[in-house]
Amino acid sequence: MTSFQRFAETCRRIEAISGSIEITGIVADFLRDVDVGELDISTRFVMGRVFPVWSQEELGIGPSLLYSALAKSAGVSEKDIENLVRDTGDVGLAASSALGAKTRRTLGFVEEEALSISEVYSRFSAVAGMTGKGSQSSKINKLKYLFSMAKPDEAVYLARLAIEELRIGVGEGIVRDAIAAAFNVPVELVERGYMLTNDPGIVAVTARSEGENGLLRLGVSLFKPVKMMLAQVAESIESAVTEMGAPAVEWKFDGARVQIHKSGDSVRIYSRRLENVTASLPDVVRAVKVEVTAREAILDGETVATGENGKPMAFQEILRRFRRKYNVSEMAQKIPLHTRLFDILYKDGKSLIDTPLLMRRQLLESCASSGILASQKVTSDIAEINSIYQQALDAGHEGIMLKNPASLYTPGKRGKNWLKFKPLMETLDLVVIGGEWGEGRRAHLVGSYMLACRDPDTGEFLPIGRVGTGLTDEMLTELTGLLKALIIRENGKLIEFEPKKVFEIAFEEIQKSPNYDSGFALRFPRLVRVRDEKSPDDCDTIERVEQLYAGQRT
Ligand code: AMP
């Protein structure tokens, strides 16, 4: 068995460095070293997860429960723990300093008994299994025992794991590269395995014990959600038709993505983030049981909350359904859901992800009644596609999807085989704070502009991304003329502008991003116009960006 100390040491070393290549190396060493029986757990632990995302097990430890357990273990008050967390800014450091010399291991009571990774896991698992009356205090007692077994430096990571916020910066990408490096297998196969199983633990174990061939054998299986295939933005309907010939056109429903796994009478539903949301959606389960005749199937679709006027309700309403744990049926009456299936990934023992779209569609139609299917029309007729688009918008949906009829189902990929076409989203008024001189014949023109939103508390301008692509030479000349007088500083090709000019920017989507100080970035930003009538103080704030972000579908 591998000691939890080894895990804590790994985390500490990772925290001390920032280069992702070095971090990958440390994770790879750790994965190679751990006992094979603990490899799946260890792979998840290093990503800050105790259970696979798709599993039904949930730790259910919030900060207040953790503080109570720490207070009990350390013999101090919960207030003391809260103060420590506030002072250190980290629950892990608070745990180690509260526990200090108190732990039994430090006192030498159980020195010979090192806490192992699997023991930590099995105790967490026991905590997850506790529900109902009295479960809070039983959870606290279990955790208290765990903390009393840990040395202070282990307690740092034990506390963070307990709330699944390890904060050492190891995500999917690093783990994928580390598995490839540790077990000498191609990174693409690790990636493929991860997209199919959505379980880095299984991928690591397979890579270690069965190598490349084992990874190749990994496939979709029932009740293990597959990463969902995603869509890119279509420039225009015409360009999609040029690229695809006759695309399969479907409404882009304004709802929430669901992946449905069915085996006989058991049905499970996973959200876009692949969380098991079955318990919240009994009406969807019922509909699937009635309308899908396949004995076994993995189905992909969108579930829509329909309002009294027959139009889709706001995305937030659907989220209320997805998050509901109690009085589920009451909520189901208030916010009824109608599901539209548009794909099938597996049917009666056979994986279909390598089957072309139109054949998958035939199979889908053969095992689901039309009431639960998304309509699809394969056509290259632009006028017909435009009319489907208009119908979708009139019905209150988002637009259309244009899918390559020959395409395979590529889990987790945002590729060109699925294109979405919808009206532009909201716009933001953003201040221009920087730019970059162009290249070649555009060397005398500012080719891209750095944009920022405003922090009303500090008055600072927080960068949120650049706009540049799609601007004609004519527009660039005009903008360069407008902004030249505002140059404060230049460094090579980079320019800093006095924050004076406001651009109205349309975009496709707001994403979280560590690259900009605002914490956000815009996908496909486009300049709508220069807002000469607006001063930088009137530009949009970080709060508005946060609101728009929260209102987007996830
Ligand atoms: P987006 O979230 O803008 O990248 O668009 C992709 C999302 O559109 C998918 O994740 C689905 O939730 C949703 N969607 C709605 N209708 C369809 C459809 N007919 N085919 C695929 N995705 C759809």
Image (cartoon, helix red, strand yellow):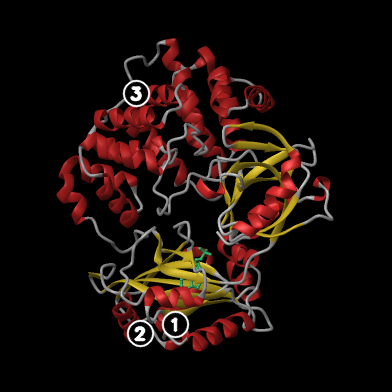
314 left or right, relative to 280: right
Look at discs 3 and 2 and give the one toward the viewer.
2
Write down the quadrant of residue 171 in the picture.
top left
Type of residue at label 2? Answer: Glu
386 left or right, relative to 402: right
Please give the name of the residue rendered at 37% of the width and 74% of the height, measured from the top-left corner.
404
Type of residue at label 1? Answer: Leu
Look at discs 3 and 1 and give the one toward the viewer.
1
Q: Please indicate, yes or no, whether residue 550 appears anywhere in the rendered image.
A: no
The residue carrying mark 3 is: 6
Q: Give the mark nearer the N terminus: 1 vs 2.
A: 2
Q: Is mark 1 within 8 Å of ligand 1?
A: no
Across and down, in percent, residue 226 comes to 36, 60
Q: Residues within 10 Å of mark 1 (few under 14, many from 20)?
A: many
Query: Which of 452 and 492 lies nearest the eye of the viewer?
Result: 492
Please give the name of the residue rendered at 62% of the width and 83% of the height, measured from the top-left corner.
395
Query: Which of 504 and 444 lies nearest the eye of the viewer?
Result: 444
Type of residue at label 3? Answer: Arg
Confirm or deny contact between disc 1 and disc 2 (CB under 8 A).
Answer: yes
Q: Residues within 10 Å of mark 2 (few under 14, many from 20)?
A: some
Across and down, in percent, residue 269 comes to 44, 66
Labelled disc at residue 322: none
Q: Give the mark nearer the N terminus: 3 vs 2.
A: 3
Q: Give the mark nearer the N terminus: 3 vs 1.
A: 3
The residue carrying mark 1 is: 373
